[in-house]
């Protein structure tokens, strides 16, 4: 049962995480629940990579293991930013966490696409493209600031969320 949970849970957790991120950017979620979500993600990422270490030793799964390993300090940065900033929305550590997760999966999605065949190739290339486009939009909005930042940030997050969700749901369905 634990193995099946590790194989399928990310297909629910990835869209949940991006939906929560969008909700936080819209002001629909307060800082404390975002902090709690980060703490949960910190634990889940460490547990997932620890429990899946041997299963993710080669091929595209190794690439994803590297994404998770790199994602642990990125998520922890967000956690620290949420704990220490008087205004988490303007915390550089929170921004590092959001931007990090928009970008970290892109190379693994591209590699997965390259190693896949048929529809899986197309899905992963499209997911990588959407994630990269969303990351660029989000970063551009951070750099530009008001008045375009809110709508462009949300559009960027939506692109990332759709791309990464489609890829993980497709992977879970195929696995």
Image: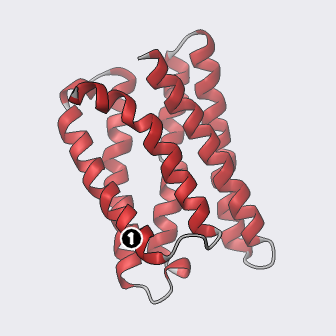
Occupied quadrant, residue 164: top right
Q: Return the x and y of residue 7 as percentages of the image width and height.
A: 34, 27
Q: Quadrant of the C terminus?
A: top left
Against 102, residue 97 (above or below) is below
Against 5, residue 136 (above or below) is below
Residue shown at the point (55%, 60%) measured from the top left: 21
| Mark 1, secondary structure of its residue | helix
Against 24, residue 44 (above or below) is above
Q: Return the x and y of residue 160 as percentages of the image width and height.
A: 62, 47
In the rendered image, which residue does mark 1 sit on? 35
User: Which residue is more in the foreground, 52 or 99?
Assistant: 52
Against 135, residue 162 (above or below) is above
User: Which residue is more in the foreground, 53 or 31?
Assistant: 31
Residue shown at the point (68%, 72%) measured from the top left: 143
Relative horizontal placement of residue 120, taking residue 55 as reference (left or right): right
Residue shown at the point (64%, 41%) measured from the top left: 162
Occupied quadrant, residue 139: bottom right
Residue shown at the point (69%, 60%) measured from the top left: 154
Q: Return the x and y of residue 20 as percentages of the image width and height.
A: 53, 58
């Amino acid at each position: 049962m634990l193995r099946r949970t590790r194989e399928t849970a990310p297909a629910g957790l990835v869209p949940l995480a991006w939906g929560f991120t969008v909700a936080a950017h819209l002001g629909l979620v307060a800082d404390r629940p975002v902090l709690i979500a980060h703490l949960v993600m910190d634990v889940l990422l460490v547990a997932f990579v620890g429990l899946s270490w041997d299963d993710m030793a080669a091929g595209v799964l190794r690439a994803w293991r590297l994404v998770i390993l790199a994602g642990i300090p990125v998520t922890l940065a967000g956690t620290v930013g949420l704990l220490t900033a008087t205004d988490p929305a303007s915390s550089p550590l929170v921004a590092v966490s959001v931007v990090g997760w928009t970008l970290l999966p892109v190379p693994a999605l591209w590699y997965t696409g390259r190693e896949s065949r048929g529809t899986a190739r197309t899905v992963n290339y499209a997911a990588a493209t959407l994630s990269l486009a969303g990351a660029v939009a989000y970063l551009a909005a951070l750099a530009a600031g008001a008045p375009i930042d809110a709508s462009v940030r949300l559009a960027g997050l939506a692109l990332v969320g759709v791309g990464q969700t489609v890829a993980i749901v497709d992977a879970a369905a195929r696995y």
